[in-house]
Amino acid sequence: MTVFLLLATGLFVMALYGVFASRNVLRRILALNVLSTAVFLWLVTVARLAPELDPVPHAMVLTGIVVTVSTTAVAVALAVRLQAPDRGSKGS
Amino acid sequence: MIGDAFQGGAILLVAAPLFAAMGAFALPRAGATLALIAAAVVLISSLTLLWLVGSQGAWRLALGAWTPPLGIGWQVDGLGVTLLLLTALVMTGAGVYRVAEGAGQDPLFWSLWLFLWTGLNALFLSADLFNLYVTLELVSLAAVALIATAGGPALTAAWRYFISTLLGSCVFLMGVALVYGQHGSLDLTLLHEKLAPDALSLLGAVLVTSGLLLKGAIFPLHFWLPAAHGRAPVAVSAALSGVVVAGAFYLLVRLWFGPFALLLSEPVAVTLGLLGAGAILWGGIMALLQRRLKMLIAYSTVSQLGYALLAFPLVAASGALATQAWQGAVVLVLSHGLAKAALFLSAGILALSLGHDRVGRLGGPGAGPGLAWLAIALAAASLVGLPPTGGFLAKWWLLQGALVGESWFWAGIILAGSLLTAAYLFRILSGPVTGDFPQPSVRGLQTMGLTALALALGAWIPAFLPMPLADMLATTWSTP
């Protein structure tokens, strides 16, 4: 189980670096996705480590996935607006 | 019976803006009407809850009758209910301004506006760490989209805000996961009983705090705020500076003086205080250097929220007056929220009637701007902390904490910050000169001016009700 916790921590740190270091819009969105995946991995491992299998972290991860999908959708929509050729005019 | 009233009020606070948001999405033309109806419902519910907390004390609701640790809890207490009322006042005021502003509106504006309000109300009601994460995300998504409705350069600002706030949420969630792994609980009350000061819990608390500092734009993580708040539509700037950043600060107070209280060692408190001191000075100096009115007001938000962080070292240092120190910080957030909303709305009126918002070239009498100037003067008095305003009461309580604890450093920071605030606000107020001024092309300028004035007067209220306010805030953390 320690392997998974170490993996989650490693992913978390890598993703943090990615968010700060990359200038590319899509890379930043992907780094944020990796970041939330690291948190989910940590949570699932925590659930497995509990004396009896704990359902609450699973519920959190499921909700978290829904939230991440929505935020990624908004991020991509915003990125498309940013790159659009007519971005000087008011968006509709 | 009392429970029913509490439950009804709390549920209406979230349900009314939520259903209005869905209605406004389906029928964009009815958006403004729906928003005003929701505003009335939320205002009445907030006032009812305020009265109930005052007369009955704090209250808890287990959603769907599932009790924690499995279910999610909501709480209504002094701290939560005062912030709910602040949200209701600022969002109603800014909403009325937006209605009066009239033409050229994005069809999705009202829907997003009401979603933002739903998220904020849920944030101030929730008593569950994971639920808080979800409400934070709701607030961020709506806020980012609202900034982006301004188009053009606001898109870049919205993008930077979005990346910062998403990063803040992920770091917050990692902290929640660490705390949950140690103690197996998400409920704030249960955590309060269980939490032990071990290294992993402390790391979790530090991550949660870092996420909130990023979301609350606390120095040196404030880099996204001025552009985002300065370029958003006027009503949105008022809501963002008045209540959205206050939400992050509310959680810091709620967590560090609640479940994380055992972890609040002196180094942690002093670090938070130093960040606050940095914010006060840096935000103040940057506000002095700005050329555009909205940017000046946005930097002022960075500076003013720094004061709220001074509560942490002051509570640790001031002993008998510890309660007064954190209450001072909460009163500061309340009066800052109202005053800042009034300033942004007035800045919007000036920009509309003068056609620009350069700080050096403000001026001109007239019906709308006259009211706007009055609102600016009243709000500025509260921000600087002149008696008898809410800002004065807040700074007085904080300063008393510093003097009793003989913490001259913090006392000096409070006074230096007030001088800086006075200096940059005087730059605006030295503007008005007599002269001709073209008839405004926008109708509803009178309404907009009156709204700004009402919010600015709201920032004075705390000074006239110090004892009821202290009693109200004292019901916090005594939730049955």
Image: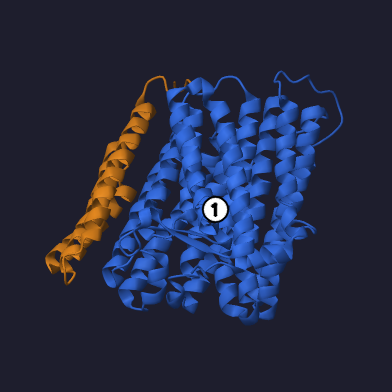
Residue at the outermost front position: B1
The chain assigned the colour blue in the figure is B
Residue at the image position 61 percent from the left and 44 percent from the top: B43
Rendered location of residue B325, percent (x, y): 63, 70
Q: In terms of depth relative to the viewer, which is nearer, B365 or B145?
A: B145
What residue appears at the point 32 percent right and 76 percent down from the top-left corner?
B199
Q: Is residue B207 above or below residue B338?
A: below
Residue B73 image offset from top left, x and y in percent: 40, 59
For disc 1, the marked residue is B5
Please give the name of the residue rendered at 31% of the width and 44% of the height, measured from the top-left corner.
A67
Point out the residue furthest to the right here: B434
Q: Is residue B431 left or right of residue B255?
A: right
Q: How many marks?
A: 1
Residue B385 place in picture, x, y as percent: 74, 58
Question: Camera-side residue: B253 or B53?
Answer: B53
Spot the orange chain and give its letter. Answer: A
Q: Position of residue B340 (x, y in %)?
A: 65, 46
Asked which secondary structure carries label 1, the reply is: helix
One can see residue B242 in this view: no
Amino acid type, residue under disc 1 in the picture: Ala
Q: Residues within 10 Å of mark 1 (few under 14, many from 20)?
A: some
Q: Is residue B9 above or below residue A51?
A: above
Residue A2 visible in the snapshot: yes
